[in-house]
Image (spheres, helix red, strand yellow):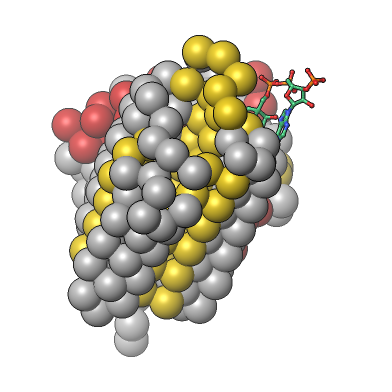
């Protein structure tokens, strides 16, 4: 008999059902959820029990257990991921079966969440903890550094280096051959058309994307 793999989700928010479905599509049984504090312990969200807080979890024996971190704040995701890994927990990469990943692409096996109908083209690299919401396209030879967030239907063109903690807004397009670098913690506004590199910690928006301010 094949034993079903179990997984626990951290973060209870608007993205929770998306990641429940992702985990299930990857063959996991979702046992329950953990919230950042104790306020919601005992509640049920989308049919799944909220088992406790992150603190409860970090003070229990979690060695060898599977977790998916679903919070939108990627800096928090990075901190909690490191704590879990240091305690011997596992944070598997989850790739939805409808996603198309080139066999020449490289996807980290730690904490990457690739949801339905995404495409990752040849020689692209997706590093630890990156999150791709549905229908994201990552062009060939593009690198997403650790904990990059890509909103739904965003298209990061070819040959772009995206630094860690960048936030790529929904339906934005970063043009291949024009954009070389998207800096650390930069934010691309929804629907933007990015035509040149984006400095770190900068918000850009519009078509063509222009700097809104520094974050
Ligand atoms: C760009 C963004 C971060 C700016 O947010 P903000 O700092 O709160 O900015 P504001 O909403 O105050 O808007 C400031 C100005 O920029 C405009 N603006 C905001 N976002 C814009 C966008 N994506 N494209 C074009 N203009 C935009 C606003 O209309 C406003 O213009 P005004 O001063 O002429 O009225 C935000 O609007 C955005 O696009 N976030 C991405 C959301 C997303 O993709 N989420 C994915 C969830 S899965």
Looking at the rendering, which quadrant does residue 204 occupy?
top right
Identify the residue at the far bottom of this view: 1
Q: Position of residue 181 (x, y in %)?
A: 32, 39
Q: Position of residue 198 (x, y in %)?
A: 42, 31
Against 151, is 198 above or below? above
**Which residue: 61% across, 40% down?**
208
**Which residue: 52% across, 43% down?**
194
Q: Decide if residue 175 is on the left or right side of residue 152.
A: left
Any part of residue 29 in sight: no
Q: Closer to the camera, 90 or 32?
A: 90
Looking at the rendering, which quadrant does residue 213 occupy?
top right
Q: Decide if residue 197 is on the left or right side of residue 137.
A: left
Quarter of the picture holding the N terminus: bottom left
Against 23, is 144 above or below? above
Image quarter for ligand 1: top right
Q: Closer to the camera, 65 or 115?
A: 115
Q: Position of residue 202 (x, y in %)?
A: 47, 21
Q: Closer to the camera, 157 or 51?
A: 157
**Which residue: 56% across, 23% down?**
211
């Amino acid at each position: 008999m094949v034993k079903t793999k179990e997984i626990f989700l951290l973060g209870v928010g608007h993205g929770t059902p998306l990641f429940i479905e992702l985990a299930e599509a990857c063959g996991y049984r979702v046992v329950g959820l953990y919230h950042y504090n104790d306020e919601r312990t005992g509640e049920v969200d989308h049919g799944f029990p909220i088992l406790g807080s992150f603190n409860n979890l970090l003070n229990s024996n979690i060695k060898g257990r599977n977790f998916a971190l679903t919070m939108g704040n990627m800096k928090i995701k990075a901190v909690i991921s490191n704590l879990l890994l240091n305690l011997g927990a596992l944070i598997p990469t989850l790739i939805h079966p409808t996603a198309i990943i080139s066999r020449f692409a490289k996807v980290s096996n730690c904490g990457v969440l690739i949801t339905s109908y995404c495409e990752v083209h040849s020689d692209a690299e997706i590093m630890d903890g990156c999150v791709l919401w549905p229908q994201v396209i990552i062009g060939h030879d593009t690198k997403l550094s650790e904990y990059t967030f890509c909103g739904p239907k965003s298209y990061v063109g070819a040959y772009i280096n995206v630094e860690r903690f960048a936030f790529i807004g929904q339906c934005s397009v970063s043009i291949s051959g024009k954009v070389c670098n998207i800096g650390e913690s930069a934010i691309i506004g929804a629907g933007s058309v990015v035509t040149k590199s984006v400095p770190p910690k900068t918000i850009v928006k519009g078509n063509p994307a222009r700097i809104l301010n520094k974050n």
